[in-house]
Structures are given as C-alpha cells and as structure tokens.
Image (spheres, grey):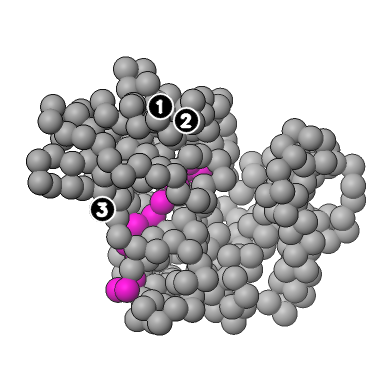
Amino acid sequence: MSDLSDIAHGLEAVARAIAGPEARATALRRLSGGASQETWSFDIETGDKSRGYILRRAPGGVALGTSAQSIGLETEAKVIRAAIASGSPAPPVAHVCTDADGLGAAYVMDRLPGETIARKILRDAPFEKARAVLARQCGAALARIHATPADTLPPLPFSGAREQLDRYEEVYRSFDTPRPIFDLAFKHLRDRAPTPPATTLVHGDFRLGNIMVGPDGLVAALDWELAHVGDPTEDLSWICMPSWRFGQMDKPVGGFGAVEDLLAGYREAGGDPRINADMVRWWTIFGSLKWGVMCLTMFRAFETGADPSVERAAIGRRASETELDLMLMLTGRL
C-alpha cells in the first residue's frame, strides 16, 4: 500500500495519537531519496497550530526480515530514542506505527530544518560557516552516539572488523569475477585487522546524505537502519571514505574537514582517546572495499533482473571507482 490516499487515511489516526482527537494530517508529500525506505513529509494541524513530521516507512508498508545489514524500523526507532536520551543529535521519534494505524512497518519523527544534499552542503554559501566547524561537530556527535548505554538499547547484531571482512569476502567470492585490487585489499586488511578499543553502539551509515546540516552546522544524524554493536572507529571512518567526499579529495572528512578535527571533536565530547588516525585509516580502506562489494551486489541484482532499476545499474558501475580509490590508498597517494 503506497497509494497517497491510503497513506493519508492512515496518518489521520497517527495525527490523533500524537496530538489529540482534533488533530488532522495535512500537506502529505513523498520525498525523494531513501533507497531502502519510503520517506513522507506531512503536517499535523491542531486548531491554528501546525507542526511538521516525517513518516519513515518500509516499501509498501511490508517489513523485510531483519539482518546484520538492516535492523527493521521498530528496532531503529528504539535505537534512536535511546541515542537521543544519551544526548545524540537525531530527530525525536513521535510515534511507532502499529497494525491499528494501517500503515504497515513505519514510524513518525519530528521534521527538523536543515539540508541533506551533499552538493549544497559542500558548495553553497549558506553553509560556509557550517563547513568550518562540521568535522569537529561530527566527531562530537559520534562520541555521544557511542556513549549510549548498552542496557538502554534493543537487541542488536554484533559486527566487528573480522566478522565484516569474512562476510564481504564471501559475497565477493560468490560472484566468481576476480578483481585483483579487491584481492589485494582483502589481504592487506586481514594482515592488519585491528583489535577494537571498545564495543559500542555504531550508527553504521554516518556520512553526508545521512546527516542534516544547517547554517550553523550539524543538526541531526538520520537513517539508523544499519545500527549495530561493534568498533566505534567504524563510524569515524565511514564519513572519510573517498566515495563520500564528493570530489573534495583534499578534505578527508566528508569533503569538508580534516581527520584531526574529527578526532579532536570526538575526544572533547568524551570519545575514546585510544582511537587514532591509523585506526581510522584501516577502517576507511575497508569501507571503500565494503562499498565496492556492495556496488557489485547491486549490479548483480540489476543483471539478474531481481531489481532491474536504473538506480541499481548506476550504483553497480561505481565498483570501478572504489578500485581506483583502493589503489590510491594502498599506495599512500590518497
């Protein structure tokens, strides 16, 4: 069920649950972006007051099975609430949908002001001030995410360095299409696999596109569907991947900042001081390899007809970009 009228009807019950019996859901529209979930914007009106919300919903409302790669929307909402209680910047969850709402697997969160499009954040004048402080702010935000008490979290999968190496190498080998630079990267990483300084909540996809930024800097971390328990260094490195620099290769943190500033913000906010730039680099190399395998997976879905969308084909061809990034990183030129 993705029909606009059906969703609008379901949101009427949600509006009453959030804001009282006189509340109405208005201004419903689907937002672009969100490859794995539906994202809808709407307002709740009560009398002469109006407030904005976002509906995050499984495609068609049908929940897929949870896995190490996706924890499911109900669990995601619980993780966000626990992280916010620990001081993490994230949109407050206003309502987790039940069968009575008729929307399927979904939850509703506050709509916050800000921008998520990387091109605008990296280039537009209104974000010039934000770019100067964003790396340090991202470090501080990750420190707060990683400080979320384990006993406040729902059950989450554990996914450490060696577990992820095993998982993604198995997927890569299943394609039976050797890529020498991938083979070299797997060996390089296995020979140097780190011992995690600690085990914490990991956001799992903290990068431009999944963070909201305003004129003064970071507003919120979005899209927590890949949250898991693991090495906190993973989060600090994912935003440093060349693919998430959007062409600004001289600024390793998201195309806008330096690793030193990211780590300084992390430590100032109470993050583990044992995490250093060398550890971040190992995870950054692995992140590029992991993303390359994910691109191959998407191309295979397109090739076999499992998902014949242009988006899958376009992402699939980016595996070659990760090969170049890996060559440059492994030879010390990036």
> Which amino acid, by three-letter code, is at mark 3?
Gly
297 over 205 or under it: above or below: above
Do tag 3 and tag 1 residues touch (Cβ < 8 Å)?
A: no
Q: Residue at x 57, y 31 (%)?
A: 67
Extent of the magenta region: 215-231
Mark 2: few/some/many CA within 10 Å (<14, 14-19, 20+): few
Do tag 1 and tag 2 residues touch (Cβ < 8 Å)?
A: yes
Mark 3: few/some/many CA within 10 Å (<14, 14-19, 20+): some
Q: Residue at x 74, y 59 (%)?
A: 318
The picture places residue 35, in percent across and down from the top left corner, at 57, 45
| Count of numbered circles in the view | 3
Farthest residue to the top: give it. Answer: 100
Describe residue 326's horizontal placement relative to residue 90 as left or right: right
What's the mark number on residue 225? none
Location of mark 3 (residue): 87
The picture places residue 84, in percent across and down from the top left corner, at 27, 47
Between 55 and 286, the one nearer to me in the picture: 55
Q: Is residue 266 visible?
A: no
Farthest residue to the front: give it. Answer: 5
Location of mark 1 (residue): 6
Location of mark 2 (residue): 3
Mark 1: few/some/many CA within 10 Å (<14, 14-19, 20+): few
> Which amino acid, by three-letter code, is at mark 1?
Asp
46 over 240 or under it: above or below: above
Gap between marks 3 and 2 measured at Cα: 37 Å
* Disc nearer the start of the sequence (3/1): 1
Judged from the image, the secondary structure of the residue bearing numbered disc 1 is helix
Between 109 and 90, the one nearer to me in the picture: 109
